[in-house]
Image (cartoon, rainbow, N blue to C red):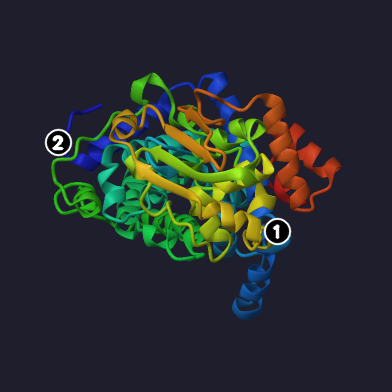
Amino acid sequence: MKETTNRSEQFLVDIQRVWERPVPEEVTARARRSLLDYLAVTCAGAAFQKEKLEAYRDFARPEAGIFRAIGTGWDVTLKEAVFLNGLNGHALDFDDGTNSGIIHLGSPIFSLLIPLARRHGIWMEEMLRAAITGYEASYTMAVSIQPGHKAMGYHATGTCGTLGAVLAAAYMLGFTEEERFHAFGAACVAASGMLKVLDDGSELKPYNVAKTALLALTALEMGKAGFKGHADPLGGRGFLKMMTGREDIELKPALLNGTYAIMKSYTKPYASCRYTHPPVEAAIRLRDRLRPEEIEEVDIRTYGLAVSGHEHTEIPGSYSAKMSIPYATAAGFLFGKAGMQEFLEETVRDPHVAALTRKIRVSEDPALSALFPEKQSAVMTVRMKDGSVFTQRVDYPKGEPENPLTENEFCERYDGLMAYAGIGKAESDRIYRDVQAGNPDMESLTGAL
């Protein structure tokens, strides 16, 4: 392939090489697990925000169609399904992602690919191949522009996620090189995502994923229709400068450090923002050695990116709790876990949880900041009322590639999410077997969800 100074061509040539490579079986196996994870998280997310979804349906009156909005039991139009899939896929903040890219990877991509595969009769294995390429595109762009992108207030899941989702879909649907390029150009124009949705009890973080998937679909349609974008939507005053304020961004290579992006992704054991996980795990490790009601104060030192927007102790609701290191840590101390139940509104209102939350302080440790993103570390110091002190450090919280969930742990997580969503055990087991066997079409896979 030709060498080029055009930033967009450079990036797309790199992603094209990923698409053309034979995918190792271990990578495909990871993609199957990522799909199962997405389905379970999305079903549970729909159950979690059922009342809001009903209010949405009452007002929006979505038209009936043939595309299942996963977890709702609703068959709606393509665009409605893509939007609702994204909204439910990120509702619990339980979906996969990477710390180095500071991005959720699977929820925008699968929210778009599954309905499109249903429409075009594409089987799961081909969809997974496209998803693997989409993960690579989203991650490569994110890791190239972070952490400056986050510092400017952008949510990379909304920005870089749009680019990865549109390229995944374009490859899955067999777009020509020109069609892919123009769909990508439209996605660069459309991409957006505000991190302000984390603050002050906002419940709009899932909306970033919903509109990301929908914008990727519309960009795909624009590219297929022949609407031409700029010759270099990334370069000049394009996407890269808009998203970082800089023109000198070095695009990282795809397959960074020799591994696929999907292999770099985490699977969350705790239903809260990934920044909360090292302290939560430290609390769970310590709780057998102390009595939470005897805690005087807790000091948490961690890397700088995990502090701002995540150190709040006043928790107005469930969404705020998921973003709060003090709240999630208090849940770890009191319950020995931080799953869906620990972030329900009734738990958030529990005065014992609130009281412990207010005893927890979070600050940056420059030495730990220097280790990020190779390590996502936190050091916890707990001072008890009797004067005793406990400390615990976590470098690789459970679910990271360096400390992955075991097969049994993943199955327990999957079963728990499906049960919370009200999916019967026989049906959830069938879906699990079908995905692992690699043979279902999208209609049979999602029809019961």
Residue 159 horizontal side relative to residue 404, left or right: left
Q: Residue at x 64, y 30 (%)?
A: 289
Residue identifier under label 1: 47
Q: Is residue 73 above or below residue 448?
A: below
- Disc 1 secondary structure class: helix
Residue at figure coordinates x 44%, y 33% from the top left:
379
Give the residue at mark 2.
5
| Residue depicted at 18% across the width and 28% down the height | 3
Rate crowding at label 1 as few (under 14), some (14 to 19) or many (20 or more) other CA atoms within 10 Å: many
Compute the Cα span from label 1 to label 2: 48 Å
Q: Position of residue 119 (x, y in %)?
A: 61, 52
Name the mark nearer the viewer: 1 or 2.
1
Q: Amino acid at mark 2?
A: Thr
Q: Amino acid at mark 1?
A: Ala
Query: In the picture, which quadrant includes the N terminus?
Result: top left
Q: Quadrant of residue 56?
A: bottom right
For residue 96, above or below residue 359: above
Task: Compare residues 37 and 173 and report the one nearer the observer.
Answer: 37
Q: Is residue 121 visible?
A: no
The answer to whether residue 77 is above or below residue 291 is: below
Question: Is residue 178 shown left or right of residue 323?
Answer: left
Q: Residues within 10 Å of mark 2 (few under 14, many from 20)?
A: few
SS category of the residue bearing label 2: loop
Q: Looking at this rendering, what residue extends furthest in the front direction?
A: 386
**Total number of numbered discs in the rendering:** 2
Does 146 sit above or below residue 370? below
